[in-house]
Amino acid sequence: QVQLVESGGGLVQPGGSLRLSCAASGSFGSVNAMGWYRQAPGKQRELVAAVISGGVTTYADSVKGRFTLSRDHAKNTVYLQMNSLKQADAAVYYCIAKLFARAGWGAYWGQGTQVTVSS
């Protein structure tokens, strides 16, 4: 069974920073991609940032220059460093991993971590 465990969400003032972590555990082989989506109330879930196995990282235009995604391959963990946070960044952030498990290739989601940006 594959699990994605997220941490690092919380309350921060506009202009502040947070660092999210997501660790994949369980029985699986190759990891093709890991990243983060977010969903604000009343809005669709959207891609924030993701890194694929070749090391290519993609970001939503709204976070470029403020967010940085990094990956620790040995720990099957990704980190999202979020700087200069805005109220528009407030959402539930979900980790995603596309990996090869017993059932084959699939996408697995974390439980979500709340990010609140408020003064």
Image (cartoon, rainbow, N blue to C red):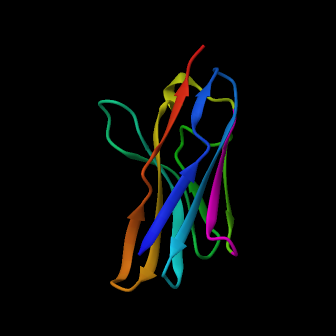
Q: Is residue 98 left or right of residue 84?
A: left
Residue toward you, 29 or 85: 29
Tell me which residue sits at (67%, 73%) in the image: 73
Vertically, is 100 above or below 59? below
Q: Is residue 32 left or right of residue 65?
A: left
Tell me which residue sits at (38%, 68%) in the image: 107
Q: Quadrant of residue 15?
A: top right
Q: Quadrant of residue 91?
A: top left
Tell me which residue sits at (53%, 77%) in the image: 31
Please state the horizontal and vertical placement of residue 59, each as a whole percent of the image: 56, 51
Please state the horizontal and vertical placement of residue 94, each as a whole percent of the image: 46, 50
Vertically, is 21 above or below 84? below
Vertically, is 29 above or below 88? below
Residue toward you, 92 or 89: 92
Span of residues in magenta: 74-83
Please state the horizontal and vertical placement of residue 23, each as a whole percent of the image: 58, 63
Q: Is residue 55 left or right of residue 58?
A: right
Vertically, is 57 above or below 98? above
Residue toward you, 60 or 71: 71
Q: Quadrant of residue 71?
A: bottom right
> Quarter of the image containing the C terminus?
top right
Q: Is residue 67 magenta?
A: no
Q: Is residue 77 magenta?
A: yes
> Quarter of the image containing the N terminus?
bottom left
What is the magenta segment's predominant secondary structure? Answer: strand
Which residue sits furthest top?
Answer: 119
The number of numbered badges drawn on the structure is 0
